[in-house]
Amino acid sequence: MAAQNGKDLLIKVDLTGDGQFETIAGLRATRVSFNAESVDVTSLESAGGWRELLAGAGVKSAAISGSGVFKDASSDERARQIFFDGEMPDFQVIIPDFGTIEGPFQMSAIEYAGSHNGEATYELSMASAGELTFTAAV
């Protein structure tokens, strides 16, 4: 597999709740992470004293973050609305040549910054808020 272009890792938001996704404007850096808590079932009978984990147990979660240039596009307005209204709409994360992750996320942080001689920037952080689906790239 050839190296992938970082700009192709996209974060999209459902603008209206009808499954119409739009890339969040102005993002220059994006990140997605997946986590799974483990459930320790080690006992005195565990072979050789090694830790044992319970398969299929624990809480799974995902986090999305991104930063970029503030453009005040319709997707920026939607992100603000999601944060201030406490909504948890569906998002998509497009991972090039891998697939698409989709599901509800809560906007846990939104930050705006700017300097006197620079552009206005923003950062977003989101936490998964339900079951996520994965569709492999074709």
Image (cartoon, helix red, strand yellow):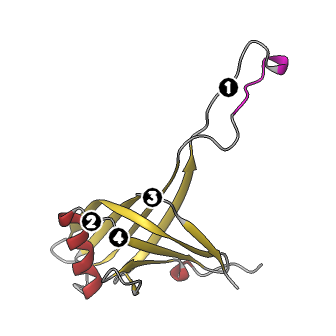
What residue does disc 2 label?
87
Above/below status of 66 relative to 26: above
Classify mark 3: residues with Cα within 10 Å, few (<14), some (14-19) or many (20+): some
Image location (x, y in percent) of residue 112: 22, 68
Element assignment for label 1: loop
Mark 4 and mark 3 in contact? Answer it, CB < 8 Å: no
Tell me, yes or no, whether the two marked residues, 2 and 4, touch with CB atoms within 8 Å.
Answer: yes
Q: Can residue 119 be seen in this view?
A: no
Element at label 4 = loop
Placement of the N terminus among the 4 image quadrants:
bottom right
Which circle marks residue 130 in the picture? 3
Q: Which amino acid does label 3 sit on?
A: Gly
* Amino acid type assigned to the residue bearing label 1 in the image: Val
Q: Which of 47 and 112 is in front in this view?
A: 47
Quarter where residue 47 is shown = top right
Residue type, numbered disc 4: Pro
Image coords of residue 125 (percent x, y): 36, 61
Part of the protein shown in magenta = 47-53
Q: Tell me the quadrant of the picture where the C terminus can be found.
A: bottom right
Q: What element does badge 3 sit on?
A: loop
